[in-house]
Image (spheres, rainbow, N blue to C red):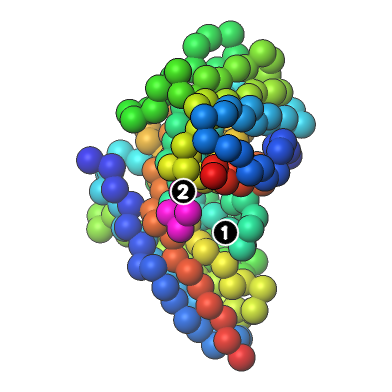
Amino acid sequence: GEDVEQSLFLSVREGDSSVINCTYTDSSSTYLYWYKQEPGAGLQLLTYIFSNMDMKQDQRLTVLLNKKDKHLSLRIADTQTGDSAIYFCAEKQPGGYNKLIFGAGTRLAVHP
Amino acid sequence: SAVISQKPSRDICQRGTSLTIQCQVDSQVTMMFWYRQQPGQSLTLIATANQGSEATYESGFVIDKFPISRPNLTFSTLTVSNMSPEDSSIYLCSVGVVFKYNNEQFFGPGTRLTVL
């Protein structure tokens, strides 16, 4: 079945690293995505990883993929107050359909 | 990448009325998608809109309630018909940009709908 799960809330101190975790159930997923949603705004694509990779780094963002455990994580280095937002994990179903299944979102709060 | 705009950005409507939401993309795309985000919830796919064919609806969504048009490769509309307060949500347009092993999915800013 299709299910993506995330913890709902994470609080970190400014300057620390944040790690947001996600688990998914469909082992045939081809791409996994991380989106950021700030209050009152749409979804911003942060990064994504192809299923044959186990790590992807883009500036302060590091994505780790453990296909065996169906676990995805997003690490934000040197977290800033501007990183406060809801982060959604999503998996793409295989084939050309391009349907995304989203997790419930993790609310990241960054405090001084 | 793709830049997506939506109109209106927000609206307050009376129950029983209909609202048409427009989605414009700055490049030609094959597939466009409409998602719904209910208050405090995650995103759920309503339908896939392909140019030149009928939209494909997900379970729980029907064409009579959410008719979709896709007249060309850069534009689509979603109508929310005979609205009730349960339709109060953010409606987001999305497109996929696929190139070799890259598959990027971009979202518009959303249309925030409140039904009284």
Locate residue A6, reporting x and y percent: 36, 62
Residue at the location (70% across, 44% down)? Answer: B9
Q: Nearer the viewer, residue B85 or A60?
A: B85
Of all residues shown, which one is farthest toward the bottom? A112
Residue at the location (33% across, 52% down)? Answer: A4
Disc 1 marks a residue whose amino acid type is: Lys
Q: Which region of the structure is painted magenta?
A: B37-41
Disc 1: which chain? Answer: A
Horizontally, residue A92 falls left or right of residue B97, namely left
Kindly state the secondary structure of the residue where label 1 is placed: strand
The residues tagged by marks 2 and 1 sit, at their Cα atoms, a distance apart of: 17 Å
Residue at the location (49% across, 17% down)? Answer: B55
Query: Callout 1 environment at 10 Å: few (<14), some (14 to 19), or many (20+)?
Result: many
Q: Which mark is residue A36?
A: 1
Q: Nearer the viewer, residue A35 or B61?
A: B61
Locate residue A69, reporting x and y percent: 25, 58
Where is mark 2, residue-wise?
B38
Horizontally, residue A45 falls left or right of residue B43, namely right
